[in-house]
Amino acid sequence: MFLIFRTDQTWPDSPEELSVDLDPGESAHARARRLKENAIVHVGDGRGRRWAGSLSWNEKKSARVQLSGMCEHAANGFPIFSLLSAVPKSSRKDWLIEKSTELGLRHFIPAEFHRSVRERISPDRFQRLSREAAAQSESWFLPTLESALSATEIQSFLQQKLEDGAEVH
């Protein structure tokens, strides 16, 4: 299955009337997978909804998906989970984002501890990595990058989650 996400789009009540243009990277990926005219492509909104459509090539390097209908949500059996973690350095940071997204991550909360190196996550990079990982794992949801918590805020955050009935590990 070929899956792309469009989170920046406002979806009307009847998205079957819509067509979605693939960006250059998605078009290149579709070409590399040798998707033919009228191949089935899925477009997700990152919030649990997905539409099926057929691929049409406009030119050699651009493509469009004409949406045909909404897909049923297939529950993947994974609970909603958030990850509160100090941000590791460079490639480990990318790996953490990719693998946790593939496992069903919904919220990533960076933690800033007193003795940890203050690494930052670029929101654009987080979005790109999580989109690619979600498409790879055929996820229905895209994770969100939350605001960083300081060491003093972590205890109250965890206490609130426990009071809300969440499991904390």
Image: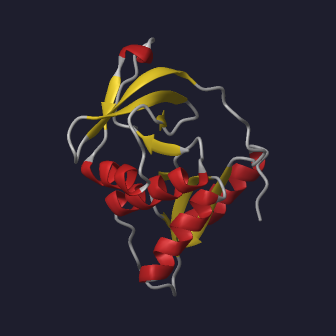
What residue is shown at x 54% (from left), y 58% (from top)? Answer: 108
The answer to whether residue 14 is above or below residue 121 is above
How many marks can you see?
0
The answer to whether residue 127 is above or below residue 59 is below
The answer to whether residue 118 is above or below residue 148 is below
Residue 116: give x, y in percent of width and height.
50, 84
The front one of 25 and 54 is 54
Where's the N terminus, which quadrant? top right
Residue 110: give x, y in percent of width and height.
50, 66
The front one of 144 and 103 is 103
Where's the C terminus, which quadrant? bottom right
The answer to whether residue 136 is above or below residue 69 is below
Q: For residue 82, which quarter of the picture?
A: bottom right
What residue is shown at x 51% (from left), y 28% (from top)? Answer: 52
* Horizontal relation, residue 91 to residue 50: left or right: left
* Horizontal relation, residue 30 to residue 59: left or right: right
What residue is shown at x 47% (from left), y 20% (from top)? Answer: 68
Coloring applied to the structure? secondary structure
Residue 159: give x, y in percent of width and height.
71, 56
What residue is shown at x 46% (from left), y 28% (from top)? Answer: 53
Residue 139: give x, y in percent of width and height.
60, 47
Regarding residue 123, the answer to whether it shows in the image is: yes
The front one of 56 and 140 is 56
Regarding residue 87, the answer to whether it shows in the image is: no
